[in-house]
Each structure stands twice: as structure tokens, then as C-alpha cells.
Image (tube, helix red, strand yellow):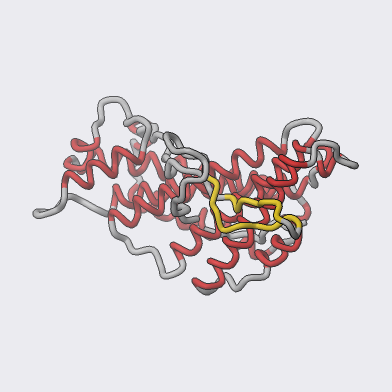
Amino acid sequence: MGALYTQIGTRCNRQTQTGLESAVDAFQRAAGVLNYLKETFTHTPSYDMSPAMLSVLVKMMLAQAQESMFEKVCLPGIQNEFFMLVKVAQEAAKVAEVYRQLHAAMSQEPVKENIPYSWASVAYVKAHHYVALAHYFAATLLIDHQLKPGADVDHQEKCLSQLYDRMPEGMTPLATLKNHGQRMLLGKGHLHRAIGFHEESLREANLCKKLRDIQVLRDVLCAAHQRTQLKYNQHREDDDLLNLVAAPNVLGEQWEPAVWACAAGAGGHSCTSRWLFAHPGRSRGHTRLVPPALDVVTHLQF
């Protein structure tokens, strides 16, 4: 059943809101089925059904659900507006984080020996691609938007403070919003980091033969890298390397993707409509909306 849901998720029309909602639903259902197997069947006939392997597959499904939700947010287009850019930057950071966790899980022995190299490469590429996008959108909101008369300064300050776990030394959210020079320095710092992450995702994609053969993947990675490089070049100055600010990490939304809960009924195992969440300060089973996510590469299935 879990494999069937992954097939459904990969075949949804990702050019429509309805199709993306169906993809999210399918990947979350797949995660629920796999999670049920992990928690229920302790004596497995083979390693591919072991708790360690099933945990990786659950992470894989949730990462793809997160990514699909981000794509749903971006489908109507990303407006160059401060609060929209904050949201997109945070959502990109969240997708990057779930793929980073997935790649870390795939890299552990003995799981590593039982996972196709191309799967681990996709997770690594996506983790770096999305963190680059997070830095790019953070840079855009800093460079392209200045405080204007009548702007909601308190709201902008709150959003900017929630974007980071810490501000660079000597900077505060409010002072940065009001100071054009600080905004430019921090924005270019984000672009510099974004370029590095883009280059790393391209490097990894070139190392894996299967990924090298996916032209749409190469096109997306190259286009994102070129867009970031172009924006950096537009604002680059001769002394940037001397004055460059070390941009902090962009934080994603502080909640986890949902898993469809599976319950054993009289007729066997079935997926119910109850969500399971891991969220600070909230008990499991508390209903929450899932944060959005962006897809650029073919989805994994098994």
C-alpha cells in the first residue's frame, strides 16, 4: 500500500493546485503506512523492512510532501513583496532541512549499503538547492525592499527576527531594516552563501551518472545558480570580499510535516484521517496545517 501511494504521488499533475494537494496527500499516506509497519512489525523477513530502513522511507515521503506543499505555494507565482519573500525563504529553508535530515539518515550504516546511490544524491542535491533558494529570497527581501512611510515596521521587524536564530554581530532587526547599507551588506552575504550552495548542488549532480542524465534537473539547477549570480553581480562592489557579512542560516517554519495515522480495524489495516505531528509544546495528534514546500526534481518512488 505504501508503494502504491508513492506511485500515486509521483503521477499527480503538479501544474495544478488540486494535483499538488493530491500529491501531498499521497506522500503523507505513504508515510503513514510505512510508519505503521515500522511500529508494528518488529520481526521482519529482510532488511528492507527493518525499522531503520522504514524510518528512512518515512523521512523520504515526508520530505516529498513538504516539497510539494512549497510548490503549491509558489505555483501562482512569487510576488516580490517583503512578507511573501519572508514566507518563501522560510519554506525553502524547511524543505532544505527535511532533505538534509533525509540525507543524514541515508548516510548511516548499514542503511547506506541498502540505499541506491542516486537516492542519496538526490537528497543531497535538493538539500543544498533549497537552502540556496532560502538565502536568495532572504537576500531579495533585504536588497529590493526599503522601509517606506506608513510601512508596518513592527511586523517587518518581527518577521526579520524570526528569519534567523541570531543576527550578525553588531546588527539588530530594526536597525538593519532602517539602514540601507546594512541591508545591502547582509543581502549580499546571503547571495554569496546562496552561490556556494548552488555550486555544491551542481557538483553533486555531476558526480552521479543518473542525475547527469536528467536534463530538467540540470536546467533547473543551472538557472537558479545563474539567477543568483546575476543578482550578486548587479550589486557587487570591489571591496565586497573585505566587507562581506557572514549571513546567518535562514530558519524554516518550526513545525514538522504530517503523517497519516494508520489504525488496525476489523477489516485489516487502514489509513484514517487523523494527523500525527511532532511539534514543540503540542501533543501528538493535535491537528495543524502543514507548512508549504517547492519541487524541482523528479520524486523518489519505490
Residue plotted at (58% across, 62% down): 25
Task: Give residue 243's position: percent from left, percent from top.
Answer: 33, 32
Against 162, residue 230 (above or below) is: below
**Outermost residue to the right:** 45
Front-most of 91 and 34? 34
**Outermost residue to the front:** 266
Q: Let me know if residue 63 appears in the view.
A: no
Number of residue marks: 0
Task: Give residue 270's position: percent from left, percent from top.
Answer: 69, 58
Residue plotted at (65% across, 57% down): 271
Residue plotted at (44% across, 51% down): 288
**Outermost residue to the top:** 169
Q: Let me know if residue 145 appears in the view.
A: yes
Quarter of the rendering containing residue 177 = top left
Against 6, residue 258 (above or below) is: above
Quarter of the rendering containing residue 76 = bottom left
Front-most of 140 and 26? 26
Front-most of 50 and 87? 50
Instruction: Give the position of the C terminus as an image quadrant.
Output: bottom right
Task: Give residue 95's position: percent from left, percent from top.
Answer: 53, 48
Task: Give residue 291's position: percent from left, percent from top.
Answer: 45, 52
Instruction: Give the position of the N terminus as an image quadrant.
Output: bottom right
Quarter of the rendering containing residue 45 = top right
